[in-house]
Image (tube, grey):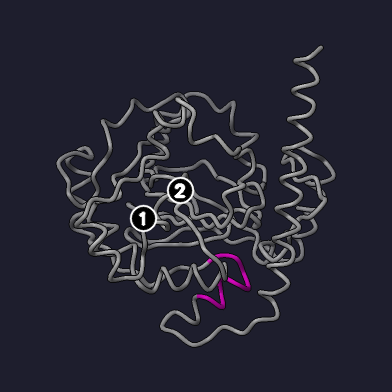
């Protein structure tokens, strides 16, 4: 009986926290609609992100070093350093591993001054890198189980916390590749007091109406290209297709993130989880500080 009551109270607390966050986001989105962006180098990219929820950002990566990383089986690369050995590809054709934040792709290219300013202007408040960057591969001919296909193909939200997802393509992606599909302009909704469970029929009817109104956008492109999209408030889904190699990282503007609890970072499981291990060395701090990235931007869990 006590265990039942504990679970019930915890469930109420989680749902209350989520709705509180959505209300805060509603206020922030209203502010953001009333505020004009000041001019800076990526002003057009900021406007597109604000209006549509996604944008291709003008970052140049080193294609030769990306090729070497792939050809050398993801080993011996300073450009993209994996935190540990790449796991075996699972039955869904997927394998992923955390990437060292000290990798050159971040210090030399991704974590630029303009990216910091773009995200800051989008959130209009402090933000954090929510987890260690992830290197992920999706291999079509290794996909022996499609039991997760139904869930993956449903449009959904990532906790409606305005989480920004950044992806770097490490191979060319077209319509037939594994990719993300996005519903433009849905990031401007707060989803306050709405059930966004992806399997909920009422929610899916709302999704169908929004798709009919706004269409969809495939997040695809050439090797080395970088996209940023609001996965927290913007409807998106995965499309399982041909092979995909990518780096993926998430930014968040709330620490009260979905199921986050006050002492979460103190648990043994969290401390041992590489997903939250983001340890820039001094050389990385020195480089990134010149681009206005600070320690607090690189650590979600205090």
- Taking 199 as reference, is 246 above or below it? below
Check if residue 220 falls in the magenta segment. Answer: no
Residue 148: % across, % down: 59, 30
The residue at 43%/51% (across/down) is 249
* Residue toward you, 232 or 169: 232
Single out the residue that lies furthest toward the right.
202
Q: Are marks 2 and 1 in contact (CB under 8 Å)?
A: yes
SS assignment for the magenta stretch, majority: helix
Closer-to-camera residue (145/95): 95
Spatial CA distance of label 2 from label 1 is 9 Å
Residue located beneath label 2 in the image? 177
For residue 217, side relative to residue 302 (left or right): right
The quarter of the image holding the N terminus is top right
- The picture places residue 219, in percent across and down from the top left corner, at 50, 58
The residue sitting at 37% across, 49% down in the picture is: 247
**Mark 1 Cα within 10 Å, few/some/many (few <14, many 20+)?**
some
Which range of residues does the magenta coloring cover?
A: 46-54
| Mark 1: secondary structure | loop
Q: Residue 301: x and y, percent?
A: 47, 44
Count of numbered tags? 2
From the image, tell me which residue sits under label 1: 172
Residue visible at 52% across and 63% down?
Answer: 126
Residue shown at the point (17%, 49%) measured from the top left:
78
């Amino acid at each position: 009986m006590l265990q039942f009551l504990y679970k019930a109270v915890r469930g109420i607390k989680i749902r209350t926290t989520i709705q509180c966050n959505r209300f805060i986001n509603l206020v922030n989105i209203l502010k953001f609609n009333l505020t004009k962006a000041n001019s800076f180098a990526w002003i057009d990219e900021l406007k597109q992100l604000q209006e549509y929820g996604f944008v291709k950002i003008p970052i140049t990566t080193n294609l030769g070093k990306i090729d070497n990383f792939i050809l050398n089986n993801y080993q011996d690369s300073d450009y993209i350093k994996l935190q540990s050995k790449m796991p075996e590809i699972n039955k869904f054709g997927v394998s992923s591993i955390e990437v060292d934040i000290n990798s050159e792709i971040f210090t030399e290219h991704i974590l630029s001054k303009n990216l910091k300013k773009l995200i800051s202007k989008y959130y209009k408040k402090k933000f954090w890198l929510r987890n260690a960057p992830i290197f992920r591969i999706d291999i079509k001919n290794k996909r022996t189980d499609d039991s997760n296909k139904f869930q993956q193909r449903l449009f959904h939200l990532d906790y409606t916390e305005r989480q920004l997802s950044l992806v770097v393509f490490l191979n060319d992606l077209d319509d037939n590749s594994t990719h993300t599909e996005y519903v433009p302009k849905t990031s401007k909704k707060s989803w306050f007091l709405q059930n966004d469970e992806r399997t909920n029929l009422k929610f899916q009817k709302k999704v169908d109406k929004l798709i009919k109104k706004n269409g969809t956008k495939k997040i695809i492109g050439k090797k080395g290209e970088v996209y940023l999209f609001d996965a927290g408030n913007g409807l998106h889904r995965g499309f399982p297709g041909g092979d995909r190699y990518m780096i993926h990282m998430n930014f968040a503007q709330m620490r009260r993130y979905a199921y986050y609890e006050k002492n979460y970072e103190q648990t043994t499981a969290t401390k041992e989880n590489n997903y939250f291990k983001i340890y820039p060395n001094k050389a990385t701090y020195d480089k990134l500080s010149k681009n206005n990235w600070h320690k607090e931007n690189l650590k979600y869990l205090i």
